[in-house]
Image (cartoon, coloured by chain):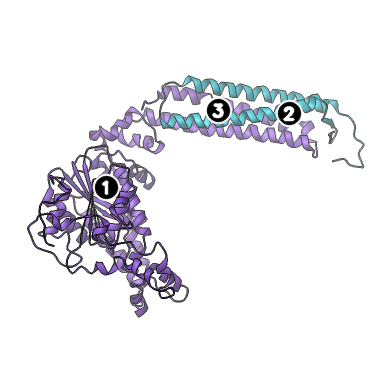
Chain colours: A cyan, B purple
Amino acid sequence: MLTLHQQPTHDAASTQELRAAVVNARAQVRDVLDARERTRAAIDSWRGPHRDRYEADTTALLGSGRAVVATIDALLLALDQELVVVRSGVEVGP
Amino acid sequence: MTGADPAELDRAARDGPAQAWTLDHAARGLDHLDGVRRWRGGRHLALVAEVVTGLRRLGERFAALDAWVEQVAAALRDADTPTAALPLLELGVEHPASHLVTAGAVRWQELRPGLLDDHRLDALAATARLPAPVRDRVQRERLARWVSRLDDRVAAVPEAPGWSPLDRLATWVDQRLLELLAPVVDLHDSPAEQTARLRAEVDGVRRVLAEPGLAVLSFDPGGPSVRIALGDVDTAGRLVVLLPGTATGLHAIDEPLVDATALHRLLQHDTAVVLDLYAAPSDLGRAADRVPGRDAGAATAAFLAALPPSTRRVTLVGHSYGAFTAAHAARVAPSGTVDALVLLGAPGVGVATTAELPVPEVWADRAPGDPIGVVADLDEHLRRLPPGWVPAPLTDPLAGLGPDPTDPEFGARPLSALPAGGEVLRGHLDYLTAGTATLQRVATVVSGTLPTPDRPTSAGGA
């Protein structure tokens, strides 16, 4: 929200800071999802309804994780295309 | 089914805390970013907030999954004692330790149902594969706890003002009519009736608990309903399920139990007689309602379906309203489950002919002087009356129980055509009384020894 009392000024440091944090979060969540995939594949002695539940829950959570990654990618795309410019105290979109 | 290696499951859950920390750390990195926190709004701030929320929720859900996996691993690791194996049952886990349930009778002997909390006791009771002695002990413990609570309820019921003439009238009116009149005048059970019924239920439970020869198969406090057996249900080659009629139940156990005992004495070897004390309608007026019979019949069918696979011969014997219940059970049971259906003094069983009953043998009997014939076909007679002559509730397609099953058009085999000695019964209440010809004939059907069941060898009375 723009305020009439404050002239927006470009704040490149804030934008870069945000981008770095987003890239970091993306790498971390990808690591976790990959580890989960590996764990799921590694359990081979488990059969029966409890295994089915584990599979179903893990699949659902991996899907949620991918949705988070997709949101992060959308944010990064917006930042890369300079659709988001962070100015002190104010966000200005296209 | 194959069990899991607990160590393998431990490994699966091991990295969970570190992963949860990683996701939370990433969320904090975004949430606490100074540049972001200074923002005052905007579409992209919402996007960042969405990512933060998503990361945190993901961490929490993975942690919950890991907690469950750890619980399974712990249960598997310690499952060499009966009480430690209980979590396996609650978790629905299949594991070699589950063999305790079916083959480890010696270990299960160590189980003390009295030490379990209600939740675990109910979970154990719901397990279909318990060996008979364990099942009996578990169900008896549940009954004992229920009756101790019932005592408190009885004490809480206020003193009765007594029966009104309208109460008496109500016993002869259809349940739906009762519901119509309910806003005008209270026709439900008086406090005196409620108290008497609760006391009778307490007595019924104590009667069951006092009979060591009875196996308690199931107990549902909701009805309340209880299923008890004479003989070994799991192994007997011949299984009979008795479904008594109106006004029976846990509060009126004596007569049905005497009947079940008489039938079991006649057959004895390789036979189990199950007495299915469901929540039957409390009086004839309410017996026009099909709903209690349908609910109880479905429960009986589920009970039969859950029995271990066997070549046993299964006969359902329904008396009075119980005949409707038995017929419904036969209709909804898995195909091939029920071999014979015996309908005694039935007011109607909800179908027009035996073609609607997927049972190889359907037998029916009505004793001379049994007034139930007045009730049979009642709904049909009422529908034939001119419009407006019949109260609307009784024109409901679900009111009444259908045509008379002893009518030749129904297609049931006449039980009275089977040869039998003994006393010829009269009236509505003595079909399974010891010494009667009818009881002998029912035993003959149960035994499955008729050489040509399609053609009974001679005509008989009763």
- State which quadrant residue B323 falls in: bottom left
Residue B97 image point, x, y percent: 32, 29
Chain of the residue that carries numbered disc 3 in the rendered image: B
Is residue A47 among the parts visible in the rendering?
yes
Q: Nearer the viewer, residue B88 or A37?
A: A37
Residue A66: numbered disc = none
Residue in view at x 31 percent, y 46 percent: B303
- State which quadrant residue B73 falls in: top left
Residue B317 image point, x, y percent: 23, 54
Distance (Cα) linking label 2 and label 1: 64 Å
Query: Which type of secondary structure does the marked residue at label 2 adopt?
Result: helix
Residue B142 image point, x, y percent: 31, 50
Query: Which type of secondary structure does the marked residue at label 3 adopt?
Result: helix
> Looking at the rendering, in which quadrant would you find the N terminus of chain B?
top left
Chain of the residue that carries numbered disc 1 in the rendered image: B
**In the displayed structure, would residue B53 be above or below residue B303?**
above
> Looking at the rendering, in which quadrant would you find the C terminus of chain B?
bottom left
Q: Looking at the image, how many numbered discs can be counted on the residues?
A: 3
Instruction: Name the amino acid, label 2.
Output: Ala
Chain of the residue that carries numbered disc 2 in the rendered image: A
Of badges 3 and 1, the one in the foreground is 1
Q: Are marks 2 and 1 in contact (CB under 8 Å)?
A: no
Residue in view at x 51 percent, y 31 percent: A56
Residue B359: numbered disc = 1
Residue B17: numbered disc = 3
Q: Are marks 3 and 2 in contact (CB under 8 Å)?
A: no
Distance (Cα) linking label 3 and label 2: 28 Å
